[in-house]
Image (spheres, rainbow, N blue to C red):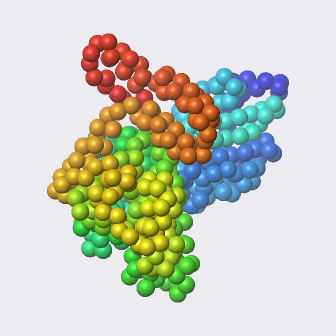
Amino acid sequence: MSAEVHSDAKIAAAQSLYAALATGDRVALNALLHPDFVGHAAEGMPFGMGGEHRGPEAMQRNLWWRIGEHFRARADARQFESLGDGRLLVSGSYLGSARRTGNPLDAAFIHILAFAPDGRISALRQLTDTAAWHAALDGPGRLQTFDYSVSGGVATVCLNRPDARNAIDMTVAQETLEVARRLAADGTVRAVLICGNGPALTVGGDIGYFQHGQSTVFGDLIQSMTVPFHQGFDILSRLDVPIVTAAHGAVAGGGLGYVYAADLVLAAEGTRFLTAFAGLGVSGDGGGTWHLPRLIGPRRAAQAYLRNTPITDAEALEWGLINEIVPADELRERALALAGELAHGPTKAFGAMRQLLRESWSNDLQSQLAAETRVIKDTANSADATEAITAFPQKRKPEFTGR
């Protein structure tokens, strides 16, 4: 075959790939894949299937055969498009069901295939709706400690252990990661509201859970909780949509992470913020040692940590931990209205703003100016920017679509 692989040959190779996957034909797969093949599965795929897989054998073992272990599924490729750089874009859906639950699977995908000069597939990047994979495995009732819903572009993420004042146990920690993955995978979400049912947003770690945990070594137990907990906050920090948090009652310990994760925070009158770690003889989690000095200053953060000094609602407002204090009976309504307002805004621009603000901490001024120049070009090419520029001389409010 010539050095330049023709489009028809690429499409034929892709179709052969999906046929071989449907039948589990290892011989055909090994013939189709280049020895230096590199696959990249979507982050957030279940069972650790996401990430990079180097070599045909690793891709088969760690992704394709693992899918076969847990799902009866096939890749239904519907469109093939040659890209200008020689790669092939394939779009379609994974269709089937989860073996354990029998729940249906219908997960949209995009595959970007690269080819070696001899015509074999040298790389495959998978983008897919990871939330659909998890939903097929676990069903609609999987979340035990959160109320989660999406309506009008707003995803409401509500801690739901009211009898425990939303204290954080292993399930809350794991479901913080699960919720973050769902948010990242759902293209209909344009803003997020984080809130809590019951008397408090969250009082932090569940001491009763620690006392009755399976491990007698608290450090091992707490570490096993903080890994998914922190992964969830990492994903939240990189979402391309704004986050609003409604804080009320006591907000303590690692639960402060739900405040740090937000771009805008409303707090009910009388809300108190407490690191609480010194009282338990531990150093802290939830990202507080990074966020709190940047939000309220290093001296105040040191006092909050070392002396376990509570931060009142008035202090939180004055120091920049929150944006507004509202009457307790209006908190949820006001926060939802704010999230709804953001959900009707220029979503691409909001995502770019979040990225620029996040990266500013590690950039010097020259680097930040360069980043702003690069990113504003991208946002200026968006449909929302075009709509806003068109609406301005017409003296009307732009109708943003998030594109």
Question: What residue lies at 27% left-to-right and 69% top-to-bottom?
Answer: 162
Q: At which x and y percent is residue 169? A: 42, 73
For the residue pair 106 and 49, the one nearer the viewer reads as 49
Q: At which x and y percent is residue 212? A: 43, 85
Question: What residue lies at 38% left-to-right and 82% top-to-bottom?
Answer: 208
Q: At which x and y percent is residue 39? A: 68, 46
Q: Residue furthest front?
A: 299
Left or right: 52, with 163 as reference point: right
For the residue pair 291 and 126, the one nearer the viewer reads as 291
Q: At which x and y percent is residue 258? A: 40, 58
Q: Residue furthest top?
A: 393
> Residue 241 lies in what quarter of the image?
top left
Task: Using the rendered image of the protein, determine whether residue 203 is visible from the camera's viewpoint.
Answer: yes
Left or right: 90, with 352 as reference point: right
In the rendered image of this protein, does residue 249 appear above or below residue 26? below
Task: Using the rendered image of the protein, determine whether residue 197 is visible from the camera's viewpoint.
Answer: no
Can you say which quadrant of the picture contains the N terminus?
top right
How many numbered discs sit on the rendered protein? Answer: 0
Left or right: 259, with 29 as reference point: left
Question: What residue lies at 28% left-to-right and 57% top-to-bottom?
Answer: 314
For the residue pair 154 and 360, the one nearer the viewer reads as 360
